[in-house]
Image: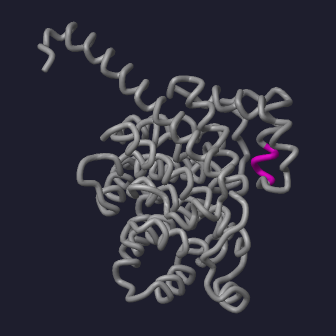
Amino acid sequence: MDDAALERRFGAVVIGSRVGDAMGTPTEALPPEEIDARFGWVDTFEGDGTDDSLMATVLAGTLVATRGRASADDWAGSLIEHRADILAKRDKFFPSVLHLLEKLDSGYLPSRVALGNMPSTSSAMCIWPVGLVNAGDPDAARTQAYELARLIHVQDVDHCTDAAAAVAVAVAAAFLPDATIRTTVDAALGAIRPRSGMRMAAMIADAVALADACGSYADFRAQYHSRFQRPIFCDSLETVPAAFALSVLAEGDLKTAVEYGANFGRDTDTIASMCGAICGALAADAPAAWVEGLGAAAVGDARAMAQRLARTMRDRASDRERNMRVVRALAGIAHV
């Protein structure tokens, strides 16, 4: 794949996730029936997102600054560095994220700052840059996603780290030869911890099976909400299975999946944003109507981020190749 094509595909992920975030904002926290009554069908957007997109921007910057090697400590440092910017937009941030930021700023260690956090999608919703810098290497995406997600979720809510790993791996696996939405879902399920992550894996698999069994979006939405709702609507046990199932229901089509997420109900901005990242990774480019709707400045920013992440992906691949040459030499294996 040439540089221009790779950057367009990275751009589809950046734009897809941001548009999903923005399109789902007006319907966030609303039940499906109210969305239908008030909006009919949501397929337009204003702005370029909320904390989903802003957290991903900070994480992307951390990955670029560390040549793709970012750890939870690195991400914590970046969040503290951007504290003033985040607080200036506090109305766009989920309270648990703001609480995390204040704990970090007051001296909590990154290894302990997540203790006591509620279940949420705060790591999975913004983890897609990890999939991009590890494009084509799902195993590396899995390892790094689990490491980074521990900054926000540990112990009783560590199922949320399984959710983050699944999303990151889906994005990375989309860049493998002949990838489809089915192969990316399979890769995501295969990446989840086999014992500790059984609950998340089962929820995603059950949601995808429901999508396959239902005859329409409306039928799937109704059945999903009757079976999968959690006490806290932002719990990744509800949002991430929905994002994967909607992406399958949309057959991997970026525009369709994002609209499905925005009209789904409950945590719509986060679900639509994850649909945008998962399906954006399979798309050749972002839809022209979205590019026009975002405007030149926002599109320029998204394209620039895509270029930086693509350069970081190439740097990371170069580092891996250099390391493998050393390993081959030590093992006495001829380079092929």
Q: Choose between 329 and 9: the one closer to the eye.
A: 9
Q: Position of residue 31 (x, y in %)?
A: 68, 82
Kindly identify the residue that appears in the image at 86 percent across and 30 percent down. Answer: 106
Q: Is residue 132 above or below residue 156?
A: above
Which residue is depicted at the point 69% across and 67% down?
Answer: 232
Q: Which percent across, then down, holds residue 302?
A: 60, 47
Toward the bottom, the furthest residue is: 37
Number of residue marks:
0
Q: Report the predominant secondary structure element of the magenta stretch.
A: helix
* Quadrant of the image containing the N terminus: top left
| Residue 267 shows in this picture | no
x 42%, y 36%: residue = 134
Q: State the colouring used for the structure image.
A: one colour
Magenta-colored span = 95-99
Q: In which quadrant of the rendered image does the C terminus lie?
A: top left
Q: Image height check: is 81 above or below 226?
A: above
**Quarter-of-image position of residue 225:** bottom right
Closer to the camera, 287 or 160?
Answer: 287
Residue 261 visible at all: yes
Assess whether residue 160 is covered by the magenta stretch.
no
Residue 26 versus residue 64 in the image, above or below: below
> Toward which corner of the image does residue 234 lie, by quadrant?
bottom right
Nearer to the camera, 52 or 5: 5
Residue 29 location (% of width, % of height): 72, 73
- Comparing 219 with 68, the one in front is 68
Give the left or right position of residue 95, taking residue 11 as reference: right
Residue located 54% across and 58% down the image: 16
